[in-house]
Image (cartoon, rainbow, N blue to C red):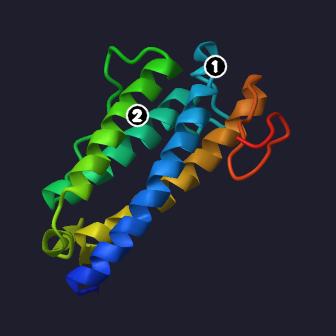
Amino acid sequence: MYTLGMQPEQVSGMVQYFLQGLESEAKTTARVVSAVPDDKGDYRPHPNSRSAKELAWHIVFTDVWFLDGIHKGAFNFEGEPIPADIQTSADMVKWYETNVSEGIAKIRGMSADTLSETTDFFGMFKLPRGLYLGFLNNHMIHHRGQLSAYLRPMGAKVPSIYGPSGDEGMG
């Protein structure tokens, strides 16, 4: 198991850095999820792949799940079923924007001492709570890249992510 301890001031500085990046990345994630055509949510590039809707939900759900785990100081996974009231990409984006904003606000309200408390992640890591924001960021970017690669084969346009795409100028 990998364990890392840090001083509260160190963790607090890293958390502020991660949160600034997360706010920007969340806007990009919302644009990519909103680009998924509602009538193509079942698209999958391979039988072993998640469908576009499943992958989009995985991204938005786990972003919020990570924020919740950091806030609570415990990571518990009980599945990620898509709520019945989320039928469209717009529904998913609305849920995401609301819940990510609330999650970020909770993290911003935490003390440096609390953010530096060591928290277990399924027996694989024991890190200060705030450092799991880095996991969240990497996870989001990884799966968002997968989802963006689904878009053109579904007949959708790829939004600007870190610069212009073949379909959109600077975002």
The image shows residue 150 at horizontal and vertical percentages of 69, 35
Q: Quadrant of residue 99?
A: top left
Image: 80 above or below 119: above
The residue that appears at 57% across and 30% down in the rendered structure is 52
- Sequence-wise, which precedes: disc 2 or disc 1? 1
Which residue sits furthest right? 166
Q: Quadrant of the N terminus?
A: bottom left
Looking at the picture, tell me which residue is in the foreground, 26 or 146: 26
**Residue of label 2:** 97
Image location (x, y in percent) of residue 66? 31, 53
Q: Let me know if residue 139 appears in the view.
A: yes
Residue 55 against residue 126 in the figure, above or below: above
Crowd rating for badge 2 (residues with CA inside 10 Å; few <14, some 14–19, many 20+): some
* Neighbourhood count class around disc 1 (C-alpha, 10 Å): few under 14, some 14–19, many 20 upward: many
Which x, y percent locates residue 139? 47, 56
Specify whether 99 is left or right of 22.
left
Q: Amino acid at mark 2?
A: Glu
Residue 149 lies in what quarter of the image? top right
74 to 117, vertically: above or below: above
Left or right relative to 6: residue 28 = right
Q: Residue at x 49, y 16 (%)?
A: 88
The residue that disc 1 covers is 37
Amino acid type of the residue tagged 1 in the rendering: Pro
